[in-house]
Image (cartoon, helix red, strand yellow):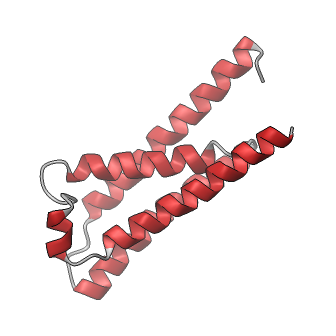
């Protein structure tokens, strides 16, 4: 029981650290983004992977369905907030496609977490 608690706590901490890293990357100047290859051909895949990872960490760390959907909504809102603040601060166009891609990463993460839980339930390894 204590090990399960430690694992979940570590996942929550890592998820929050990941979100902070996403925020830092979002507000780097464009020149630095080019150096880190956060723009260009793989930009959309990066969004999907980043938000899928946050979702796996945070949503996978709780057990109730309500908590999972609440955390997923928070992660989607976080993605929107980042895009809106980039628009507001740098006067960039609001990238609605990035918002949708972030939400898609969250949806994929939710599907993976829920499928994993269902497989565990069927196998009886809960």
Identify the residue at the far top of this view.
Answer: 123
Residue 28 shows in this picture: yes
Give the image quarter of residue 125: top right
Q: Position of residue 50 (x, y in %)?
A: 39, 51
If the image is split into quadrants, where does the C terminus sit? Answer: top right
The answer to whether residue 1 is left or right of residue 38 is right
Residue 62 shows in this picture: no
Give the image quarter of residue 99: bottom left
In front here: 40 or 14? 14
| Residue sitting at x 52%, y 32% | 112
Q: Position of residue 64 (x, y in %)?
A: 75, 44
In front here: 48 or 69? 48
In this figure, what is the number of numbered marks? Answer: 0
The answer to whether residue 88 is left or right of residue 31 is right
| Residue sitting at x 14%, y 74% | 31
Q: Position of residue 117 (x, y in %)?
A: 66, 28
């Amino acid at each position: 029981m204590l090990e399960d608690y430690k694992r979940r706590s570590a996942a929550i901490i890592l998820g929050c650290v990941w979100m902070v890293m996403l925020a830092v990357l979002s507000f780097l100047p464009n020149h630095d983004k080019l150096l880190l290859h956060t723009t260009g051909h793989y930009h959309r895949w990066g969004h999907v992977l980043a938000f899928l990872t946050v979702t796996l960490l945070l949503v996978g760390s709780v057990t109730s369905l309500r908590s999972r959907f609440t955390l997923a909504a928070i992660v989607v809102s976080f993605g929107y907030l980042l895009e809106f603040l980039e628009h507001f601060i740098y006067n960039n166009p609001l990238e609605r496609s990035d918002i949708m891609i972030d939400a898609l990463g969250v949806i994929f993460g939710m599907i993976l977490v829920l499928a994993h839980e269902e497989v565990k339930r069927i196998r009886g390894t809960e």
